[in-house]
Amino acid sequence: MSIFDKVKEMFSGADEKLQNIPEQAKNAAEDAMGKAKDAAGDAADTAQNAAGDAKDQAGGMLDGLRDKAEDMAKDGIDKASGAVDSATGGKFTEHIDKGADMAKDAADKIDGKEG
């Protein structure tokens, strides 16, 4: 067997292999595109879940702040009405208490809940 026969044998079928390269590249590109779409979808789902969790957490924090603001307002009303009642020597206790109750009712609406 000559060297030319050996080279010819080594490269036999190369035409078929070369013809399959575009198809192989197309298949590889389609596979890569599918994987990229899946990864993007997973990333979008993860981001959406994280955003929902952050929204829920922020809502909980906001509710807590509203409750705290309401409590602080009511405490301030109690302290102010007590100071005014002391300053007037108890002469207007009934009117002061009525005004304090009205102010507390208004403060009760800070958190958007009854009571």
Image (cartoon, rainbow, N blue to C red):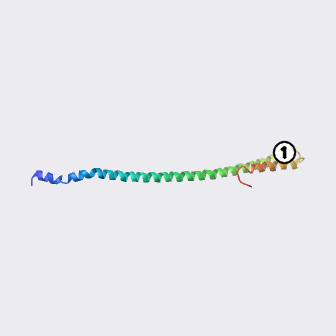
Q: Viewer-proximal residue, 2 or 71? A: 2
Residue 64: image location, x then y, percent:
66, 52
Q: Viewer-proximal residue, 30 or 57? A: 30
Residue 83: image location, x then y, percent:
83, 46
The local secondary structure at tag 1 comes to helix
Q: Is residue 51 left or right of residue 27?
A: right
Residue 30: image location, x then y, percent:
36, 52
Q: Is residue 65 left or right of residue 100?
A: left
Q: Identify residue type, mark 1.
A: Val
Q: Which residue is mark 1?
A: 84
Residue 113: image location, x then y, percent:
71, 54
Q: Viewer-proximal residue, 77 or 7? A: 7
The quadrant the C terminus occupies is: bottom right
Say which residue appears at 66% left-offset and 52% top-offset: 63
Q: Is residue 39 left or right of residue 18?
A: right
The quadrant the N terminus occupies is: bottom left
Say which residue appears at 86% left-offset and 44% top-offset: 87
Q: Residue furthest right?
A: 91
Q: How many marks?
A: 1
Q: Is residue 50 left or right of residue 97?
A: left
Q: Residue furthest left?
A: 1
Say which residue appears at 81% left-offset and 48% top-offset: 100
Dot 1 alpha-carbon crowd within 10 angstroms: few under 14, some 14 to 19, many 20 or more: some
